[in-house]
Image (cartoon, rainbow, N blue to C red):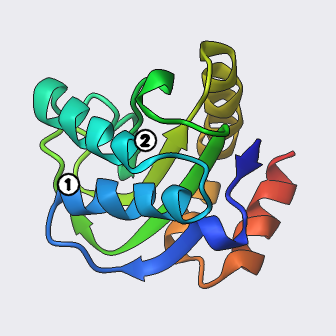
Amino acid sequence: MKFLEENMVQFDVEVANAEEAIEAAGNLLLQQKLIESSYIQAMKQAYQTNGPYFVLAPQIAIPHARPEDGVNEASVSLVQLKKPIPFGHATNDPVRLVFGLGAASSDEHLVLLRKLTGLLNNADNINQLIHARGIADINKIIEMGR
């Protein structure tokens, strides 16, 4: 299980829209061979079909798709957006933090979501993630959250 490791986090990313943000988060997982490219398409398709259901809190999106859509290993990436992007959510827009979540089973999905929720339940952590400048900042936030 890979969770916000160094090559899975990107800062100050510029995107034009929600789909580009989803793609950016997915590409970090794809580059590490944690998912197949089909998974990125499935995440975008889920967004097109179901809307911004994965914008779970103010400024936070956690796009994901089904395990069978191409997950190789349970993993979470993070794209910190340079400028907030609207995803079309009534109360939680605009989004600054996009966590790409890939789980190979529903058990893994729950474990990863629990880890993320633990991190994101704290407003200070969210603020620090939005202003993080490097992986050392991210690691510090994760360590403090344990």
Hey, what amino acid is under mark 2?
Answer: Ile
Q: In the figure, is residue 120 to the left or right of 95? A: right
Horizontally, residue 100 falls left or right of residue 135, namely left
Residue 126, position as x, y percentages in the image: 55, 56
Instruction: Please name the residue that numbered disc 2 is placed on.
Output: 62
Viewer can see residue 75: yes
In which quadrant of the rendered image does the N terminus lie?
Answer: top right
Q: Which residue shows up at 86% across the image and 57% down it?
A: 143
Q: Which residue is mark 1?
A: 19
Instruction: State how far apart marks 2 and 1 are (Cα).
Output: 13 Å
Relative placement, left or right, of 115 versus 51 is right
Query: Which quadrant of the figure has residue 33?
Result: bottom right
Q: In the displayed orientation, state which residue is furthest to the top.
A: 106
The foreground one among 124 and 1 is 1
Q: Viewer-nearest of labels 2 and 1?
A: 1
Q: Quadrant of residue 45?
A: top left
Indicate the amino acid at tag 1: Glu
